[in-house]
Image (tube, coloured by chain):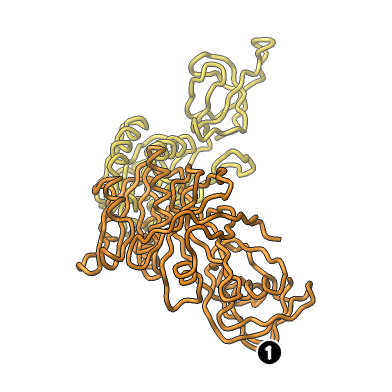
Amino acid sequence: MSINTEMTLRVTAVTQVADNVRRFRLERPDGGPLPIFSGGAHVVVSMVDEGRLRRNPYSLMSPPNDTAAYEISVLRVEKSRGGSVFLHSHVKVGDTLAVSQPVNLFPLDHRGRKHLFFAGGIGITPFMAMMAQLEREGGAFELHYALRTRSHGAYWQELQQRYGTHRVKVYCDAENMSIPTARLLQYQPLGTHLYVCGPAGMIDATLASARNSGWPEQNLHFERFLAPPPGKPFRVVLQRSNVQIAVEEHQSILEAVEAAGVDAPFLCRGGACGQCETAVVRLDGTLEHNDHYLEEAEKASGKKLMICVSRFHGRELVLDL
Amino acid sequence: MPDPAIKSRPVYTGLQICLQAQSNLIALEGEGALALTDQVAAIGPAFLPRSDILYVATGSRPRGHGQTLQQLAPRSFWQAPSVPTLLTRLRAMLETATMGTRLYVAGTEGFIGQVVQLALDAGMDAASILTEHRGSLARRVQCVHCKGITEDVKVSPFACAHCGLKLFVRDHYSRRIAAFQGVNVDAEAPGTAPAPQELYP
């Protein structure tokens, strides 16, 4: 049973905010209030793309206390498995989308005296909500925002106007600028928490730099959503439901399970949260663990699988579902 | 070793020097100095040029450790004349400290408690503070009646250093106050307190 209870929301505005980024404003059709959320939360948007159900997570970027609407920003990724291209080319004002309740896997640590944000590209979105929240609460923060070109980067101008250039620094690849991570991490006051969201390489480099500078693990926060990677098709037996399902090239096990009408738990759909952990009953073949939730020893045991991103190749896989 | 069965008592896990730390603040009391010299013997002196040592010769068996610590040649060494003066200097150091700084504290429980409390108030994260108990099990006790704190309590019951009431020392530690709780033991019939026993040598 999934804890998500979907809401049907109407698209009330679509805005092109940068070269490949569109913002979607979502409201309740009856105009009523939406649940408030906390900065860093995301929703899972369900869409039917060429007959296939896609559920993708998107960070909420609107102010968390604004119950009138949710806003998400979507980067168009051409060579992906769908979802972003669908939202860009097919969804227009007046359409409805099925949207989950907000879930926060990337919350602010309120014990922090100062919050230091590192964003890369579309990774800016959770920080928009966090900054709105901190501004309202009087919390100290600083954003360092790396983007490819100024026209590719979303929101950097309005963020600098709203919060000032002393709190919002922009670094542009095309101008040979990059975030001076090591130097920044050297001069932060006690009680600073670091948050990073962006491409995997940027997250890894930032965390490595912080650890090398002696930052404790508890002060490091990151959000790393993986899109389910494609792979060769395979078959899976769901023991409790007593069905065999086919997982196609551009489908995750979780999506194939849902398509077969079996309800499996999930939250992030990106290999981060651990909600979809599934026990392996029988295995003859190799598991491809693509998540970053399970410990290495758990992955090696072959007893558990995160079905939102991981795959399988071999003769037989039986899951406890 | 402090009794780990007392659930409210912090666990002192030992001074494990973090070699990645940019800067080390080391506060030592009495034979707590030995916790540091043991670490130097175990992992070598490479971290000492990034380390500031504050030492106070109180607590238990503070014999000649000041000189030993100074000879380690840390970035700085200062021997404080008392715990309050050590705390005053440490507060000033914490005000300008940056992330990547670790604080190491060793000594009696009352000393550790006061240093940790100061560091948390300065915004330091609990994960950046490492503690090791050394020496006497004497307790720092707050009187629940007058709120006065008596240092170095080895017996129970004892007379509050502030209001004079006979206090029974409870196994109840407050991290907020960095002290155990002392409650009057002969309130109904003053003068009938049992004889003090040395429980915390």
Q: Residues within 10 Å of mark 1 (few under 14, many from 20)?
A: few
Residue B32 visible here: no
Expressed as whole percent of the image width and height from the top left, the position of residue B173 reads 56, 34
- Of residues A173 and B72, the one drawn nearer to the viewer in this rendering: A173
Q: What secondary structure is marked by label 1?
A: strand
- Along the horizontal axis of the image, is A40 left or right of B122? right
Q: Is residue A93 above or below residue A53?
A: above
Chain B shown in which color?
Answer: yellow
Q: Is residue A123 above or below residue B27?
A: below
Please state the chain letter of the residue tagged with numbered disc 1 in the rendered image: A
- Along the horizontal axis of the image, is A186 left or right of B147? left
Q: Residue at x 63, y 72 (%)?
A: A254
Expressed as whole percent of the image width and height from the top left, the position of residue A296 reads 55, 72
Q: Residue at x 50, y 56 (%)?
A: A11
On-image quarter of the C terminus of chain B = top right
Q: Which residue is mark 1?
A: A315
Expressed as whole percent of the image width and height from the top left, the position of residue B20 reads 35, 60
Amino acid type, callout 1: Arg
- Of residues A304 and A179, the one drawn nearer to the viewer in this rendering: A179
Residue A102 visible here: yes
Q: Is residue A105 above or below residue B189?
A: below
Expressed as whole percent of the image width and height from the top left, the position of residue B24 reads 33, 51
On-image quarter of the N terminus of chain B = top right
- Along the horizontal axis of the image, is A25 left or right of A214? right
Q: Who's orange, chain-wise?
A: A
